[in-house]
Amino acid sequence: MVIGLDVGSTTIKCVVLDDNHNIVFSHYERHLSQITAQTARLLERIQTEVLKGEEAKLMISGSAGMGMADRSSLPFIQEVYATRVAAKRLVPFTDVIIELGGEDAKILFLSQGMEVRMNGSCAGGTGAFIDQMASLLQITADQMDQEAAQAEKTYTVASRCGVFAKSDIQPLLNQGARKSDIAASIFQAVVNQTIAGLAQGRPIQGKVVYLGGPLTFMSQLRSAFDSTVNDHLQRRWLACGL
């Protein structure tokens, strides 16, 4: 068997494959900064419930996994490389990968040579930003996704920094703006930050794959990306037609 363990800035993800590469176990949880303890508990669970004495290979990835792998003398794989390999195997002919993590965001352009655009120095437009905005609205991130589904309009919200975003959102709350509209506006701000800040004018086209917790669990965030990417392509096609 093979164990893949991804320890990110805010979550731990794990998958166990049998000898035929079938998934026999998967797990996703927030580690709440208790990285070592949470990982140890997870591996003990896998040993007891899945492996049952059988040996397995272990590979670690993720921003917080690098130090763990080094201290434990375990093999480490860089997450961008792992993402590229996985996409090639599971989603052939992928052109663009958009990934939102806990504290970073990435766009991988795979066509015509690989190019990586990463927002690693600021948590604006990432899962941490979404959590911060949900807290401001006094709801959970899941509830914010549910609220956004009921939105009727969107407002301009800065996503580069939580402080700036709060300065946009607080007046809206004070003026009685609908929470659902604000939630949708926050998601749109994340989309704008990712596309404008990372794509930087390079067209997002072809087969696009979404990765990361926010895009996996928040359907309204995915919808906001879909709408913006499709609109971006339509505008480009119209411009070319002129």
Image: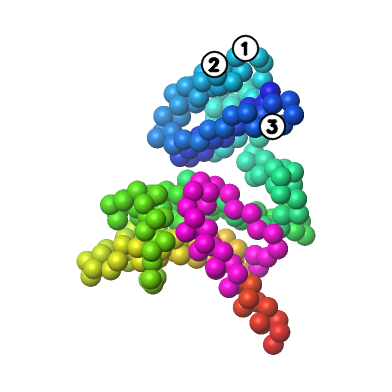
| Place of residue 131 in the rendered image (x, y in percent of width and height, measured from the top left) | 38, 49
Q: Going 49% across and 48% down the picture, which residue do you hit?
A: 217
Question: Relative to the observer, which residue lies in front, 20 or 229?
Answer: 20
The answer to if 32 sits in the magenta stretch is no
The chosen color scheme is rainbow
Element type at mark 3: loop
Q: Looking at the picture, does residue 236 appear above or below residue 73?
A: below
Question: Relative to the observer, which residue lies in front, 136 or 217?
Answer: 217
N-term-proximal mark, 1 vs 2 = 2
| Place of residue 72 in the rendered image (x, y in percent of width and height, measured from the top left) | 58, 21
Q: Going 71% across and 45% down the picture, which residue do you hit?
A: 90
Q: Looking at the picture, does residue 235 appear above or below residue 92?
A: below
| Place of residue 2 in the rendered image (x, y in percent of width and height, measured from the top left) | 67, 26
Q: Nearer the viewer, mark 1 or mark 3?
A: 3
Asked if one can make out residue 112 in the rendered structure from this viewpoint, the answer is yes
Q: Going 47% across and 45% down the picture, which residue do you hit?
A: 102
N-term-proximal mark, 2 vs 3 = 3
Which quarter of the picture shows residue 148? bottom left
Q: Type of residue at label 2?
A: Thr
User: Which residue was labeled with disc 3?
Assistant: 22
As measured in the structure, the alpha-carbon distance from the residue carrying label 1 to the one carrying label 2 is 8 Å
Quarter in which the N terminus is drawn: top right
Q: Which residues are magenta?
A: 203-231
User: Which residue was labeled with disc 1?
Assistant: 53
Question: Relative to the observer, which residue lies in front, 233 or 114?
Answer: 233
Check residue 48 in the rendering and tell me which mark sits there, or answer none.
2
As measured in the structure, the alpha-carbon distance from the residue carrying label 1 to the one carrying label 3 is 19 Å
Q: Looking at the picture, does residue 242 appear above or below residue 95?
A: below
Asked if one can make out residue 193 in the rendered structure from this viewpoint, the answer is no
Q: Type of residue at label 3?
A: Asn
